[in-house]
Image (cartoon, rainbow, N blue to C red):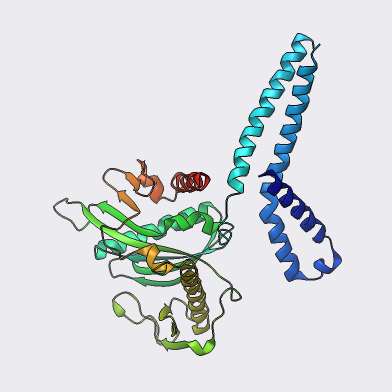
Amino acid sequence: MFDKLESIEKKYDELTMMMTDANVLSNQKELQRIAKAHSDLQEIVSTYRAYKKAEKDYNEADSLIKEGGLEPDFKEMVETEREEAAETKKKLAEKLRILLLPRDPNDSKNVIMEIRAGAGGGEAALFAGDLFKLYVKYAESKGWKIEVLSVHETDIGGFKEIVFLIEGNGAYSLLKYESGVHRVQRIPTTESGGRIHTSTATVAVLPEVEEVDVEIDPNDLRIDVFCSSGPGGQSVNTTQSAVRVTHMPSGIVVSCQDEKSQLKNRDKAMRVLRARLLARMIAEQQQEQADERRSQVGTGDRSERIRTYNVPQNRLSDHRIGLTLYKLELILGGELEDVLESLIAHERAAQLQL
C-alpha cells in the first residue's frame, strides 16, 4: 500500500509543478485537465502526509520513552502523545485503505435522472412526483443546480415521466445508489375505505457525458419536430418546437418539449441520448446481458424493488442492505444523507473484503 502511496504523492508533486509551467498556463484545455487530475489526488495525498506526520510523532515519542531517564510528569505527557499519535495513525491508515479502493470514473460527473411511474396508475404518477421533489430538495441542500430536460405530466398531478439534470461536484458518486424500483405504501386521497395501496416508480441515474465521450454519427439520427402537448394531450403551443430524436442503430428515442425553442429542445434531447448511449456502452463492456438502463429500472412491477416507503408507519426500508429508518417524512423532505452514507459504507466494506 505504501509503495502505491509514494507513487501517488510523486505524481501529485509533478502535477503541481506542471500547473506553473508557462506552456500549460497558455493552454486552457490542458490546464483544466491537469488541474482536475491534481484535484482528484489532493485528498489522498493530504491524508498520506498527515499519516506520515503521525508516524513521525509516534516514533519520536517512542524513542524518548525507550531512552528512559524522563521525569514522571514529562514521561506521562510523552506517553499520552504516543498514544494519540498511534490512534491517529490507525484512523488515517483506515481512511487511506478506503481512498485507495477502485473509483468509479464517473463519480465526479453530473447526473441525468429519469423517473417514471410504474405499477399503480395515477397514484404511481403522484409518487413519481414525490420522488422528484425529494431529489430537488436534496440537490438544493447540496448547493447543486437542477434543470428539467423532459417532462410528461398527468391530469391529476405527478408525472408519467420526468428527466432532469443535476449539476454538482460528485453528484453521480452519491445519487447512483438511487437507481432501481421504489415502492410506496400509503392511503391515496381518493381512497374512501382507508385501504393502503402499493405503487411503484422507477429511477435511472446516468452520468452526464460530453460530446467527446460518445461519438454520434449525424447520419444515424432521425429528428422529428411536432407541437408540444400538456396533460391529457392538450396543445401547449402551436409552433413545432418539440423534438423527437431517434438513434437508429440502438433504437433509443428521446423526446423533449418543455422549451419554446426547438433548438433548446434538440440540445436537451442530445444530452439525454449521449447519457443513455454511454450507459449502454458500459453495459456491453461489462458483458452484461441487459443494458445499463434496464438493469437499473427493471420492469416497474411491484415485486421488484430496492426501497419501500411506508407512509402510515413513517418508515423507509432499503432492501439492498437491510436498512430501516423511521423518519420517512424527513427523508421525503430531502434528508437523504443517512440513507446514502449507509449505502456507501456497505459498498466500501464489500470492496475491502475482496
Residue 239 seen: no
Relative image position of residue 171 (x, y in whole percent): 54, 58
Q: Residue furthest top?
A: 72
Figure check: 264 above or below 95: below
Which residue is more in the foreground, 78 or 349? 349
**Percent x, y of residue 242:** 43, 83
Which quadrant is home to the N terminus? top right
* Image side of residue 266 versus residue 51, left or right: left
* Residue at 57% in and 55% down: 103
**Which corner quadrant of the image does residue 30 belong to?**
bottom right
Q: Residue at x 69, y 20 (%)?
A: 80
Q: Nearer the viewer, residue 157 or 205?
A: 205
Q: Does residue 338 lie above or below 259 as drawn?
A: above
Counting from the top left corner in percent of width and height, residue 256 is at 44, 78
> Would you identify the image quadrant in which residue 294 lies?
bottom left
Q: Give the residue drawn at x 45%, y 88%.
A: 222
- Which of the 4 image quadrants contains residue 19? bottom right
346 w.r.t. 161: above or below: above
- The image shows residue 315 at horizontal and vertical percentages of 32, 44
Q: Nearer the viewer, residue 177 or 111?
A: 177
* Outermost residue toward the left in this view: 193
